[in-house]
Amino acid sequence: MASLTDLSFLEEPDLQKLLADFSNVRRTFLPIDAYDPLLDEENPHALINNYRDPATGLTLGLSKWFFSGPSFDSKQNALGYEMRKCEVVRYIDSEELYEMRWLCNGQYKKVVRFNLVFLREDQEAFLRRMSEAERMRAQADLMMKYLFLIEKTKVPKFELRDIWKTRISFMIQSYRPSLKDRKFRNPALFLELPPGERYVIPES
């Protein structure tokens, strides 16, 4: 029996095609940070201190540098960005964002955790963590579309015609069960029988 939390049915080809072809569904932006499996376990301030380079005293990392303008060649970089070095300056609790400074131009920027990889952290573990979050987000996206499809699907309204109602009413009123040739027990004799003999089928 499938678990209530088992969503593997969403990956069935027929349902995938139905969800993809459902034109009324608009893609909803689901922030990947909301599906981070380790988000609640991290202490951002401690991370900055733990990953600080003892030689330079700086906490360095990589973040997405997005290309724009006429100089951007989409054929050379299909992602539209590259990872560039930055200094992680601080964590802003009120905004739940990291403030970082690009080493290439000194400009500051605020980023979410998944747009920041510390140079001294296990980058393979970070990629696995992001992959898991992306998988969960994709599953949530499918579930939202699935529920939206069910909610918006129009079920034809079924009504009984008057002639059908008349026929059903007539059949109910005219029904009389036939009791001919049926044998019934005598209640008084039934109670006088020993318990082991009370449920023996009476002879015709």
Image (cartoon, grey):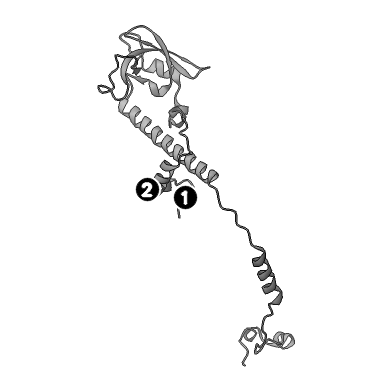
Residue 145 place in picture, x, y as percent: 47, 40
Q: Tell me which label, 2 or 1, sits earlier in the chain.
A: 1
Residue at the far right: name it: 188
Which quadrant, please, contains the N terminus? bottom left
Indicate the quadrant where residue 67 lies: top left
Q: Is residue 143 above or below residue 36?
A: below
Query: Mark 1 belongs to which amino acid?
Result: Ser
For image coordinates 70% across by 86% down, the residue present is 190
Frontmost of labels 2 and 1 is 2
Which quadrant, please, contains the C terminus? bottom right
Query: Could you say which is closer to the camera, residue 42 or residue 99?
Result: 99
- The residue identified by callout 2 is 13
Query: Could you say which is closer to the camera, residue 181 or residue 111?
Result: 181
Q: Is residue 153 above or below residue 159?
A: above
Query: Mark 2 belongs to which amino acid?
Result: Pro
- The residue identified by callout 1 is 3
Within 10 Å of the Cα at label 1, are there few (<14), some (14-19), or many (20+) other Cα atoms? few
Left or right: 74 as drawn, with respect to 12: left
For image coordinates 25% across by 21% down, the residue present is 76
Q: Is residue 156 above or below residue 168?
A: above
Query: Could you say which is closer to the camera, residue 128 or residue 189?
Result: 128
Query: Could you say which is closer to the camera, residue 18 or residue 122?
Result: 18
